Amino acid sequence: MAPPKLPVDVGAALNALRGENDVLRDANRLLREGNATLQAQLVEVVKLNHALEARIVDLEARLRSNSSNSSKPPSSDGYSKPAPKSRRRRSGRKPGKQPGAPGQHLAQVADPDVVVIHSPGRCSRCGGELASAPVTDVVRRQVFDLPPTALVSTEHAAEQRRCHCGTETSAAFPAEATAPACYGPRLRAHVDYLVVRQHIPVARVTELLRDAFGAPVSTGTVVAMVREGAGRLEAVLAAIRDRLAGADVVHADESGLRVQARLNWVHSNSTDALTLYHLDQRRGTAAMDAMGVLEHLTGVLVHDGWAPYRKYTKVSHALCNAHHIRELEAPTEAGGQPWASDMITLLSDTWQLALTTKAAGHSTFSAKELGHLRAAYRRIILAGQAVNLPAPPTGRKGRPRRTKAANLLSRLDIYEDDVLRFAHDFRVKFDNNLAERDIRMVKVQQKVSGGFRSREGAEAWLAIRSYLSTAAKNGVNLFDALHRLCVGDPWMPTAISAGP
């Protein structure tokens, strides 16, 4: 039986419904596509937001960074220098001389060079003559002063005598008499001391010599005296280099220096008893190898973490914790990084404990103490990683951008052994301040006297500076050391320790 035939209006209604359904289906598809697009855009916005937040944190950290919470030099602070901070622990004592301490003062000597007698002429009461009156007491005062200074000219006359055989023989001149008229070793030593040790510019040295001694020394002569002294140091510098290469612990640093109006690099290797400088146009390992110390070193190398030092694999590395504490100050001040403050406390307290333990005669902490130290260190690192999560991937090539706090945390994590080297071996210092003090003298020279006009002049200055720094570390009088140098018999570092 055929189905009943629907009315015309019902069929039209169904067709209309089918059309509306198609429209709704298309609208739904468009909405889904639009939703997917919005979700993708939201992901990009979230990524951009994270990137901007990290950028804001980084920029705020840069604005707050100064020489006290980063590796920036103090000269970069300008006139808005931060308030000084001292990390030394208070001793509880008042400043100045302590009760019971002997103190220091200018004391009289038992045998003065000159004695001047002052006698009263007349009585202060009646005015009578006192020339023949008895002496009842003497009150003594001593005045210490410099003697009058002036050049002393010494003529050396070398006789020639004829032997009965007819041969004429001349007497030998002393080593300092190198020309018909020349300056002696004491004045030369004074020049080297003023130029190299005291960083006085050459022109002002000539002025001082003229005004203080009446010596009309030219600037060219001053420069020649410094180079001549440096030329006699080849054996001394070789001895310093050999002892550094065999030392147990060596501190290294480098700094820029202007030579002939171009940037050069001064590298320094130091111990408590030795200092050696090297000038090079390069900063990396090629210059370090040319210096001739680190490539032979098998002990501990203390440095600031600069990557080229990692090339030396025969040594144990130790990182400067003074740098770490300065860098940890920035996230501490910014807030939101409590691990940074905890790490400062752990490192500082461990160093104080190491000093106490070393004073008691130990060379390292016990295994139990080292275990506790390592556990505390790891807890701080994990706490830092919890607040410095990796940034979400951006789809860009290369390493994702990280904040300075995250980079510092990563360094402390990767190089944990090098950070804590001072706790495992008490020969290793907590910081690299020894090398920084030595290399700072190069910056002082450039600040006071400017750069060097010639490479030869810079190398001569650094050679004598190596000699004087080493002599000073060993308690040698620097004028005596320079006088010996100028007479051709320089002090040699033969009986000194090459330790840290």
Image (tube, rainbow, N blue to C red):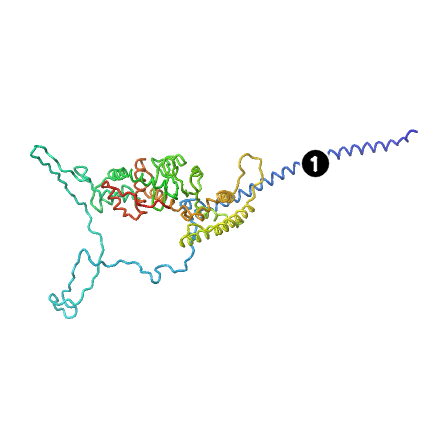
Instruction: Report helix, strand or loop for mark 1.
Output: helix
Which residue is located at x 40 percent, y 40 percent? 298
Number of numbered labels in the structure image: 1
Q: Residue at x 21, y 59 (%)?
A: 110
Instruction: Name the residue tied to disc 1.
Output: 32
Q: Which of 358 and 59 lies nearest the eye of the viewer?
A: 358
Is residue 390 left or right of 256 when viewed as pictured? right
Given residues 244 and 43, the one toward you in this image is 244
* Residue type (three-letter) at the residue carrying disc 1: Arg
Task: Name, please, the residue furthest toward the right.
Answer: 1
Q: Give the image location of residue 441, x and y in percent.
A: 34, 44
Q: Name the spot of residue 68 as percent of width and height, x first.
A: 44, 48
Expressed as whole percent of the image width and height from the top left, the position of residue 49 reads 58, 42
Query: Would you identify the image quadrant in which residue 278 lies?
Result: top left
The single residue placed furthest to the bottom in the displayed view is: 126
- Horizontal and vertical percent for residue 64? 48, 47
Tell me where residue 307 sits by quadrant: top left
> On the rendered image, what quadrant is the N terminus found in?
top right
Q: Can you name the residue that lies furthest to the front here?
A: 367
Residue at far left of view: 164
Disc 1 crowd rating (10 Å Cα; few below 14, some 14-19, many 20+) is few
Q: Is residue 175 left or right of residue 236?
A: left
Choose between 298 and 238: the one closer to the eye: 298
Compared with 161, 500 (above or below) is below
Which of 399 and 65 lies nearest the eye of the viewer? 399
